[in-house]
Image: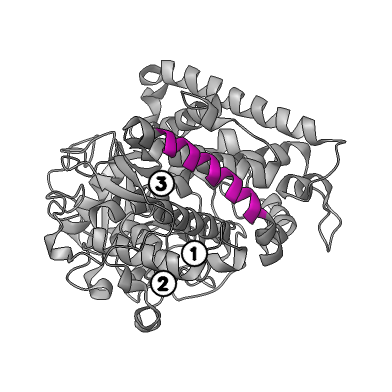
Amino acid sequence: MAERTEAPAGDGLPKGFRSAELGWPELHRIPHPPHRLPLLGDVLGVSRRTPMQDSLRYARQLGPIFRRRVFGKEFVFVWGAGLAADLADESRFAKHVGVGVANLRPVAGDGLFTAYNHEPNWQLAHDVLAPGFSREAMAGYHPMMLDVADRLTAHWDRAVAAGRPVDVPGDMTKLTLETIARTGFGHDFGSFERSRPHPFVTAMVGTLTYAQRLNTVPAPLTPWLLRGASRRNKADIAHLNRTVDDVVRARRGARGKGDLLDRMLETAHPATGERLSAENVRRQVITFLVAGHETTSGALSFALHYLSRHPGIAARARAEVDRVWGDAAVPAYEQVAKLRYVRRVLDESLRLWPTAPAFAREARADTVLADTHPMRRGAWALVLTPMLHRDPAVWGPDAERFDPDRFDAKAVRTRAPHAFKPFGTGARACIGRQFALHEATLVLGLLLRRYELRPDPGYRLRVTERLTLMPEGLRLRLERRAPGDAAPAPVAEEAVPSDPRCPVHGTGD
């Protein structure tokens, strides 16, 4: 077995896709699904629309580390908490830009999310933009977040008056797009004034869907099988580029707003004096607009689904909002962090359905994973976050059950490290995670304060995949709370019907 040795991050690692047999000397010891087909691999019973959920089902069958072969490419998947904790060791492992993320490089290039470790623009952009997520900067974004939330509640009030259910994923997408566009770039897409999604959203969904489809088609056949989709993808990328170029052009020479775009255009690296190039500015703006709203909208949508299905939990969260915010017309920045139970609801939703459902790690040098599986330098594995978050060794035999108290302070302190990773891990974890958590906690508090959430009794959770995860077809009916209404007494959860089938597990939700 190879000895554990260290090497500087990104130094001389092989580039491009590396099938697992090239990096795992004892790959035969890792289980794989039965009934492999020649040339095609492990494709029996899988769906091109739900490859992540297919992998989760295999994970349950095969254990904490397994492999799949698809069209000649071998992948290693990990979800056991001990294995994931070992992969989180920054001295031995680094971020790997896996095939799904690499498929976004035609649009995002060396932006923060899609940059390879050896590309210098990642460190430059990270150092320039990190102050944009400081506490002081976040407090400055708070009033704009409230303004966008007002537009959402006005939209939902009209739905209540008309007796219509609300489209939760669609409206959360509008909310989070407008929030990152306004706070980060001083731009208004007018999403709530449109009857259809903004063309930027349509193009973004198109690029994400195309990137996922590339994973399910043999590379030699892509020019034939995805010819039309490829043309549409090029048009989508061109639209994203034009939209961002217009935003940047309007800002150049204008009075600064002190936001992320100003930092990209005006701030030099504090040590080197280097600035972001015009091309990299475009890539970073696209990265923030896409990643900054797509994942947060999914997190809010899943949280609202669970709150509507668990009225006792919703009542407890609502009582906290009423107590902490009191009679204040709008919450102050400092009051959002005091919603500790609401934050637990959000964390528990991210546990069951982390909207960025996987992250990849590669070995900096020859090493042995968890003292068991040798890996060559550059070998990589994909961590399945929804399964890591369901590992019964960490979360108990009821890991499928929605229970925000898993995140009370005592439970968090006693839990194994690296068992909860909705934002990735290490130096390349999501730079905007505090922004997303503040925004989502604020919005959940505002909605709980204003509405009672009524689910469709016939709805069963379905999860759509476009590299990120989102509830599909989720509609809720709302009832306005009168000002000063006390939160109802908690409802016993045993009286609340749960969804009989979970997309991954089969029973329970």
Tell me: 278 left or right of 192: right
Using the rendered view, name the quadrant where residue 406 is placed. bottom left
Which of label 2 and label 3 is nearer to you?
3
Number of dots carrying numbers: 3
In terms of depth relative to the viewer, which is nearer, 116 or 183? Answer: 183
| Disc marking residue 425 | 1
Using the rendered view, name the quadrant where residue 508 is placed. bottom left
What residue span does the magenta drawing correspond to?
Answer: 141-158
**Earlier along the polypeptide chain: callout 1 or callout 2?**
2
Which residue is disc 3 drawn over? 298
Q: Residues within 10 Å of mark 3 (few under 14, many from 20)?
A: many
Q: Does the CB distance between marks 1 and 2 fall below 8 Å?
A: yes
In terms of depth relative to the viewer, which is nearer, 349 or 110? Answer: 349
Q: Residues within 10 Å of mark 2 (few under 14, many from 20)?
A: some
Which residue is disc 2 drawn over? 418
**Earlier along the polypeptide chain: callout 3 or callout 1?**
3
Dominant secondary structure of the magenta stretch? helix
Tell me: 389 left or right of 498: right
Give the secondary structure at mark 1: loop
Residue 140: x %, y % from top left: 70, 57
- Looking at the rendering, in which quadrant would you find the N terminus? bottom left
